[in-house]
Image (tube, grey):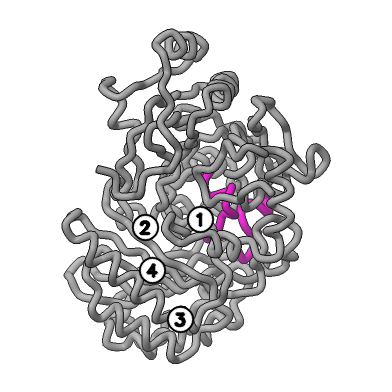
Amino acid sequence: MSSRPRTVDAAVELDSASIDTFRSSLRGELLRPGDADYDATRAVWNGMIDKRPALIARCTGTADVIEAVNFAREHQMLVSIRSGGHNVAGNAVCDDGLMIDLSPMKGIWVDPTQRTARAQAGVLWGEFDRETQQFGLATTGGVVSTTGVAGLTLGGGVGWLNGKYGLAIDNLLSVDIVTADGNLVTASASEHPDLFWGVRGAGANFGVVTSFEFRLHPVGPMILGGMVIHPFERAREVLHFYREFTANEPDELTTYAAMLTGPDGNLVVALVICYAGPIDEGERVIAPLRLFGPPVADMIGPMPYRSQQSMFDEAFPHGRQSYWKSSLMHAIDDDAIDIAIDYMSRVPSAGTATLFEHYHGAYARSEGGETAFSHRSDPYDFVILSVWDDRAETPANVRWTREFFETMRPHLSTGVYVNVLDNDEGVDRVKAAYGDNYERLVALKHKYDPTNLFRMNQNIRPG
């Protein structure tokens, strides 16, 4: 039984001849319920998601994507798009419709001279970093290496390099996208610039992006990263320090504060850093952070950039139950700190963490109207990452998360990062994700997808 309400879209009855014709048009596989790989393919990172598509088109290239989009449009099927499958809302999978699976599309091409890279839509950030780091290059790309390039980028793309190089979308040069009419379009600053604007933050609404071209920057291969850990009993002091320390961070430094359960079962507070610059200078900049406390553990040091990118992988494995709440913050006030500590002191799952993420530097210097992602003035993101194993514990964990978030709400901004929205938050939260850009996005949706074929997302409905 699905853990999400079933879509209101009626299941489409397809005859065997139509399915056979569709299958023969693909170079990749077409899976149906009962096929050997069906259950493994429909499973995504969030174990709460248990949906059963009528068909899964495992695309090996752009031609397969075009065939799949045309088939779905002609048969009026509900469509979902899977790339990395890491999004917490689980929109990659639909009930009774067609899942367009891009995960087999793994091509990566790096131009170290021009400092650019093109990646197909099935690439994960760990795979992307492996190729670019061969040349000492990188672009902003998440904090978990198993996250997909496509989903993260289309919603904005935060990561350890926000301060120095901006979001993933700030480094996006072009995309190839199959629109609702089945046409392949290249969108960039010079070609279809209106679509390129919308793709950078609301991209899942306008088509199926099959490849991304990024600008790269010199990064590593060694950076200064890791974390210091403090006992939970000192959480208030640590978070006050975090607030003061991040007020004057240089662009090269990104710092998160996390309350979580340590390996020994005790709650702790961790300050996690990434300094993407000269190691000696980084040591000087973060010296106050390492001296504060002092911490019970100091795991900061020079490390490969790829190790920094995969630091949280084990904490967020595939298949666990996950339910998140998040909102941006203009400031971390004392009351917000006290609320967060109170709720974490009675957290129902040892897998759950609460984060304060700091956004600054190049991230904040971009104007809110330059991309569909508009919220550039709030320097913090507050995130509740509720994670547990036993489905029987779902009601208690979801209830705790919602109550925690509602209690925090007076201390939060209205803006939210669209990639951490769940599916039960309503149209007003989707509007809040885009702020003043929302009406422009409605017009763009009407132009490129007037029938709302691509609606398994944080949906912008056409006017």
- How much space separates mark 2 and mark 3, taking CA atoms? 20 Å
Q: How many marks?
A: 4
Relative image position of residue 204 (x, y in whole percent): 57, 44
Q: Amino acid at mark 1?
A: Asn
Residue 229 horizontal/vertical position (percent): 33, 76
Q: Nearer the viewer, mark 2 or mark 4?
A: 4
Give the image quarter of residue 173: top right
Element carrying mark 2 = loop
Under tag 3, what secondary structure?
helix
User: Real-space Cα distance between discs 4 and 3?
Assistant: 24 Å
Q: Between tags 2 and 3, which lies in front?
A: 2
Question: In 3D space, how far apart are the residues under numbered discs 2 and 4 (Cα atoms)?
Answer: 15 Å
- Mark 2–mark 1 Cα distance, whole angstroms, equals 17 Å
Closer to the eye: label 4 or 3:
4
Reading the image, the residue beneath label 4 is 384
Name the amino acid, label 2. Answer: Phe
Q: Earlier in the sequence, mark 2 or mark 4?
A: 2
Q: Which residue is mark 1?
A: 419
Residue bearing the label numbered 3: 289
168 inside magenta stretch:
yes
Q: Quadrant of residue 303?
A: bottom left
Q: Label 1: few (<14), some or many (≥20) within 10 Å?
A: many
Circle 2/circle 3 CB separation < 8 Å: no
- State if disc 1 and disc 2 touch (CB < 8 Å): no
**Gap in Å between the C-alphas at discs 1 and 3?**
30 Å
Q: Position of residue 337 (x, y in %)?
A: 41, 86
Span colored in magenta: 149-171
Q: Residue 23: image x %, image y %? A: 45, 13
Specify whether 437 is left or right of 49.
Answer: right
Closer to us: 122 or 424: 424
Label 1, label 4: how far apart the Cα atoms are = 13 Å
Residue at image mark 2: 312
